Amino acid sequence: MLILKLDTEEWNQSDYTSTSGNGVSFTIYTEEKMVNVKDITGYTLEFELFDQDKNRIMSEDCDIVTAASGTGEFLPEDGEMNINFIGEATVVLSKSGEQLTARGTNGSAKLRVRY
């Protein structure tokens, strides 16, 4: 089981940028206590948002920030997140022959988007 911890709990529409540091940042852990990080070297990452009814409303590629530390960031493009939203995020990790999903626990992947 992989655990997703968002470092960004709220993201505002005016936060569009093409540089790292102003997107939705996160860390992926190997256990629920969120002590040991997952080395995400060699994976491609997909950032997904689910509404409160568990409907997937968005699925986009995202970037690895520091693979050995399990950190990544989703940098929305202008117009990509034109929604008011409170829901959950997941990150899907993929590489040849393997697909894993990191999910939140106890609200660790809850995100609010202000439009």
Image (cartoon, rainbow, N blue to C red):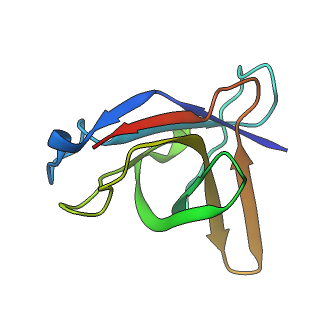
Residue at 62%, 45% (x, y): give it: 39
Q: Is residue 16 left or right of residue 2?
A: left
**Whole-percent x, y for residue 48 in the image:** 56, 58
Q: Nearer the viewer, residue 9 or 66?
A: 9
Residue at 77%, 37% (x, y): give it: 30
| Number of numbered markers | 0
**Whole-percent x, y for residue 93 in the image:** 64, 62
Q: Is residue 98 above or below residue 11?
A: below
The quarter of the displayed image where residue 43 is located? bottom right
The quarter of the displayed image where residue 60 is located? bottom left
Residue at 23%, 37% (x, y): give it: 22
Q: Can residue 8 be seen from the camera position used here?
A: no
User: Which corner quadrant holds the C terminus?
Assistant: top left
Q: Is residue 88 left or right of residue 59?
A: right
Residue at 33%, 35% (x, y): give it: 11
User: Which corner quadrant holds the N terminus?
Assistant: top right
Q: Nearer the viewer, residue 76 or 35?
A: 76
**Whole-percent x, y for residue 87 in the image:** 58, 41
